[in-house]
């Protein structure tokens, strides 16, 4: 049960104030309630944003809002194949929705990226939806809902969307730039870690939630086939520590054939070995931000690494190595506000080329090295799962000194996270919910069952 600390009570009231109602039923939470800034799309409910709020509501015994959300967003999912390429594809979930009234009748209007800046497709929405559905079922034991035909169809469409035949040779999910929480150009096209961690968790959820009947057998088989390959690929090829750096440093290039050691033809000159060997502790490591032909992105992405721990995409040794790295490089990755979305920031010519001179993503701001308080709940979940609760307490104590005073900002700027984000909305709902969820997870380890996965049997 959530404690009655003054800050927690204030956060709960702010979360209550963010609830969206549709036909007199609660169906989600708006992105932010900043009274001093134009709303734009912050008055909508984003699927990725709502997940932390939803899990908090589940822990509070408010499962009806989560059920309503799942049912209503499922209705927004396109079920028919589209010949028009400008329409959202079958199985996709919207990035967000809002309640609008036409001639006195309410309806939900979905945004699949048609109105988004740069028209970004929300690849991660359907993955988060799967993860939330599993959390709902684990909390409420409402298998009757998930076994309804409309939910089984929705799950099948998402799994088909993720597991279709593709122009790809890897078990990971190929996506365009801006396809996740980082929804602007940041050099993440290809196989970014954030998406792979969510993809893995969504596949695990799909394997649990699909009813084992004849209609679902082909997808259950496809999931069982993909998961071991995905686990092996990520653990072996994305992992970076001092040992792995020594192997990559001595890679030969232009190798041909099945026996090639340098499978991705990585040129060692493209990797900042000297900086990395100084930055990486002996007992630490992390998963690289991206991997593809002649490319390994050595930036540290917090969501992807933390979700890899929570979902058991990483093994025990790797999970502890990531937390050891966070502890050792606390000032770089956490600083004065947990925690950096990515590290280091893109700067100078690299920033110009990879972001397109994006002024919002200038160095150490927004997605480019900014600090996002919502990540506190993922850090708390990972730390609790791996027996490093001290790290979670330390991060929450830092956040509690400022979040309420600063009016719950969306993100912070600067290398140390001391500046409220230049364009950050205040009373950002997932900042509020992320704090409340982190408190719950460290107060009661049993709550981890809603978000965590055990080791996949075939990977043990």
Image: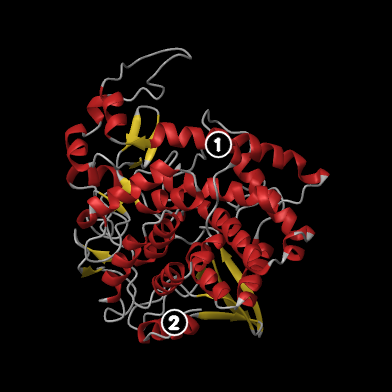
Q: Secondary structure at mark 2?
A: loop
Q: Residue at x 30, y 36 (%)?
A: 241
Q: Residue at x 51, y 73 (%)?
A: 56
Q: Could you tell me if residue 162 is visible in this image?
A: yes
What is the spatial separation of the Cα atoms under label 1 and label 2, in whole angstroms? 38 Å
Mark nearer the N terminus (1 vs 2) = 2
- Along the line of sight, which residue is nearer the eye, 413 or 136? 136
Q: Secondary structure at mark 1?
A: helix
| Residue at the far front in the pictured view | 387
Q: Which mark is residue 3?
A: 2
Compared with 239, 194 (above or below) is: below
Q: Which mark is residue 129?
A: none
- Residue 218 screen position, x and y as percent: 74, 38
Q: Which mark is residue 459?
A: 1
Q: Residue at x 27, y 50 (%)?
A: 343
Q: Which quadrant: the C terminus?
A: top right
- Along the line of sight, which residue is nearer the eye, 343 or 451? 451
Q: Which colour style is shown?
A: secondary structure
- Along the line of sight, which residue is nearer the eye, 114 or 175? 175
Q: Residue at x 51, y 57 (%)?
A: 113
Viewed as shown, does residue 284 lie left or right of 311?
left
Viewed as shown, does residue 167 lie left or right of 409?
right
- Along the line of sight, which residue is nearer the eye, 190 or 448? 448
Q: Could you tell me if residue 94 is visible in this image?
A: no
The answer to which quarter of the image holds residue 261 is top left
The answer to which quarter of the image holds residue 369 is bottom left
| Residue at the far right in the pictured view | 214
- Label 1: how many residues lie within 10 Å, few (<14), some (14-19) or many (20+)? few
- Residue 80 screen position, x and y as percent: 72, 51
Viewed as shown, does residue 186 lie left or right of 124?
left
């Amino acid at each position: 049960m959530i404690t009655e600390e003054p800050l927690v009570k204030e956060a709960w009231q702010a979360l209550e104030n963010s609830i969206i109602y549709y036909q007199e039923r609660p169906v989600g939470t708006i992105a932010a309630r900043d009274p001093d800034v134009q709303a734009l799309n912050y008055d909508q409910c984003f699927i990725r944003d709502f997940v932390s709020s939803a899990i908090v509501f589940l822990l509070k015994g408010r499962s009806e809002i989560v059920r309503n959300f799942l049912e209503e967003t499922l209705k927004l999912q396109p079920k028919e194949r589209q010949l028009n390429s400008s329409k959202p594809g079958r199985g996709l979930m919207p990035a967000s929705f809002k309640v609008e009234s036409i001639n006195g009748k309410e309806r939900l209007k979905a945004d699949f990226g048609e109105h988004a800046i740069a028209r970004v497709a929300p690849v991660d929405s359907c993955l988060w939806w799967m993860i939330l559905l599993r959390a709902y079922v684990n909390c409420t034991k409402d298998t009757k809902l998930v076994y309804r035909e409309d939910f089984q169809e929705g799950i099948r469409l998402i799994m088909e969307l993720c597991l279709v035949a593709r122009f790809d040779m890897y078990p990971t999910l190929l996506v365009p730039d801006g396809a996740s929480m980082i929804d602007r150009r940041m050099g993440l096209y290809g196989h970014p870690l954030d998406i792979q961690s969510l993809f893995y968790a969504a596949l695990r959820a799909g394997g649990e939630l699909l009813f084992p009947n004849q209609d679902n057998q082909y997808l259950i088989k496809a999931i069982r086939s993909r998961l071991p390959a995905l686990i092996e690929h990520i653990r072996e090829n994305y992992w970076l520590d001092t040992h792995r750096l020594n192997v990559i440093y001595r890679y030969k290039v232009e190798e041909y054939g099945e026996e090639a050691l340098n499978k991705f033809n990585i040129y060692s000159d493209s990797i900042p070995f000297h900086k990395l060997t100084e930055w990486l502790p002996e007992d630490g490591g992390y998963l690289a931000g991206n991997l593809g032909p002649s490319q390994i992105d050595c930036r540290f992405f917090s969501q992807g690494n933390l979700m890899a721990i929570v979902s058991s995409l990483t093994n025990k040794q790797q999970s502890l190595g990531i937390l050891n790295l966070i502890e050792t490089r606390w000032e770089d990755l956490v600083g004065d506000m947990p925690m950096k979305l990515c590290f280091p920031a893109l700067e100078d010519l690299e920033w110009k080329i990879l972001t397109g001179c994006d002024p919002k993503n200038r160095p150490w701001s927004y997605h480019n090295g900014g600090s996002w308080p919502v990540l506190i709940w993922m850090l708390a979940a990972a730390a609790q799962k791996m027996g490093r609760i001290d790290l979670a307490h330390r991060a929450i104590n830092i956040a509690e000194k400022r979040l309420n005073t600063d009016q719950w900002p969306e993100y912070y700027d600067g290398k140390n996270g001391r500046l409220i984000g230049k364009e950050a909305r205040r009373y950002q709902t997932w900042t509020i919910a992320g704090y409340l969820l982190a408190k719950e997870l460290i107060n009661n380890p049993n709550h981890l069952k809603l978000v965590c996965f055990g080791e996949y049997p075939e990977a043990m």
